[in-house]
């Protein structure tokens, strides 16, 4: 299904994949309707990835209201890669920009993209992503406020996030589209292809979007650990670059450190129990003290995170974090092993 307000020559196309973020998507579209760039020269393409929250109705309403090229397509739920690829294929512009459905573009966003790419031969451009709340365990947002080296990306940069970036159309003809075989980390995989093909991405601090913070429950954090199952895939495809950046070591250290620390402490305790031949009462007392200390540590961490009035951590999430946060690194480890078996590649 296609809904369009008007037709004209398009210089830049903005592609927004979305899934059940109706409230946030409205803010994104409103920010794009208030750009300083001529409205006849850009289009905004919404790819509905099988939403069930009334996103389609919202966009249809906004198409009738907003004076810009606002286009809507709906597809079966296939993930962000398929949605972005669908948007690229439907677009008309020679520049294709991406913004996430939980971001708000500054009013000069499109103008900055077009003028910057006119002045150089870079294959794309990225910029600052800001937020008024620091990311934490229960808060999802992105903050990126600087480039690297001389303001361009190269083989030493791991990933270009898709919440604030634009590419020349020819780049997709040269290195291909987003990888639909993986459901997460597709932006990282695309970035690696940019890097190994020696394509350069300009960093311009004037190209700004605000990433709207969203609350992430303990259960959803646990579900999100599945992202690391694609690390072995990336390592398999880009082994030299992956090893050079020591990404495998970084992943293992950061994602599984908590589990290994807890496991090692328990192992040491069991060895002490065995060597000293302690009684059952002493063993239970030791375990009880250990769990009390573990819970107090978790309570201290929750208090440090629970500082934003608009993002108060729920009582159930506090309880789950204090008592079961060890499940997070354990889940990371399980998904890393699952990915290693699936893609037949160990992160070593």
Image (spheres, rainbow, N blue to C red):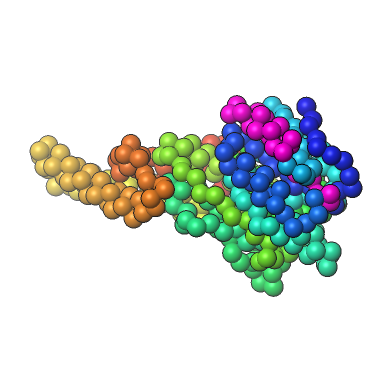
Q: What residue is rendered at 78% in x and 44% in y?
A: 68
Vertical arrangement, residue 295 with respect to residue 247, above or below: above
Tell me: 187 left or right of 292. right
Residue 302 horizontal/vertical position (percent) = 33, 50
Q: Is residue 201 magenta?
A: no
Residue 25 horizontal/vertical position (percent) = 62, 41
Q: What residue is rendered at 59% in x and 33% in y?
A: 20
Q: Is residue 18 visible?
A: yes
Q: Nearest the camera: 80 or 17? A: 17
Residue 204 horizontal/vertical position (percent) = 69, 66
Q: What residue is rendered at 67% in x and 44% in y?
A: 29
**Residue furthest to the right:** 9
Q: Nearest the camera: 309 or 275? A: 309
Q: Which residues are magenta?
A: 40-65
Q: Is residue 158 visible?
A: no
Q: Is residue 64 magenta?
A: yes
Tell me: 166 left or right of 231. right
Vertical arrangement, residue 111 with respect to residue 216, above or below: below
Position of the N terminus, as image quadrant, is top right
Numbered marks: total: 0
Indicate the quadrant where residue 181 lies.
Answer: top right
Q: Nearest the camera: 101 or 62? A: 62
Indicate the quadrant where residue 270 lies.
Answer: top left
Tell me: 118 left or right of 208. right
Tell me: 130 left or right of 29. left
Residue 331 horizontal/vertical position (percent) = 45, 39
Q: What residue is rendered at 36% in x and 54% in y?
A: 307
């Amino acid at each position: 299904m296609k809904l369009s307000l008007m037709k004209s020559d398009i210089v830049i196309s903005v592609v927004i994949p979305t899934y059940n973020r109706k409230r946030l998507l409205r803010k994104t579209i409103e920010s794009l309707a208030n750009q300083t760039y001529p409205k006849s020269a850009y289009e905004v393409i919404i790819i509905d990835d099988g939403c069930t929250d009334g996103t389609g109705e919202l966009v249809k309403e906004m198409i009738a209201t907003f004076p810009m090229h606002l286009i809507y397509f709906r597809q079966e739920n296939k993930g962000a890669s398929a949605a972005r690829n669908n948007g690229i294929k439907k677009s008309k512009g020679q520049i294709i920009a991406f913004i996430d459905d939980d971001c708000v573009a500054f009013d000069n966003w499109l103008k900055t993209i077009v003028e910057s790419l006119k002045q150089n031969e870079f294959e794309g451009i990225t910029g600052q992503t800001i937020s008024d709340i620091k990311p934490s365990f229960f808060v999802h947002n992105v903050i990126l406020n600087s480039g690297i080296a001389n303001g361009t990306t190269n083989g030493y940069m791991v990933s270009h996030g898709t919440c604030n970036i634009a590419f020349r159309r020819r780049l997709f003809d040269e290195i291909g589209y987003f990888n639909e075989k993986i459901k997460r980390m597709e932006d990282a995989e695309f970035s690696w292809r940019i890097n190994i093909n020696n394509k350069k991405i300009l960093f311009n601090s004037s190209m700004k979007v605000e990433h709207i913070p969203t609350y992430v429950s303990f259960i959803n954090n646990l579900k999100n650990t599945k992202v690391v199952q694609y690390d072995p895939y990336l390592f398999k495809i880009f082994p030299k670059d992956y090893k050079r950046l020591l990404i495998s070591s970084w992943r293992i250290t950061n994602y599984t450190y908590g589990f290994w620390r807890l496991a090692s402490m328990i192992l040491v305790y069991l060895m002490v129990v065995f060597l000293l031949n302690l009684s059952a009462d002493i063993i239970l007392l030791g375990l009880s003290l250990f769990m009390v200390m573990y819970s107090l540590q978790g309570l201290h961490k929750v208090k440090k995170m629970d500082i934003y009035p608009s993002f108060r951590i729920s009582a159930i999430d506090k309880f789950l974090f204090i008592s079961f946060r060890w499940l997070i690194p354990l889940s990371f480890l399980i998904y890393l092993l699952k990915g290693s078996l699936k893609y037949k590649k160990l992160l070593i």
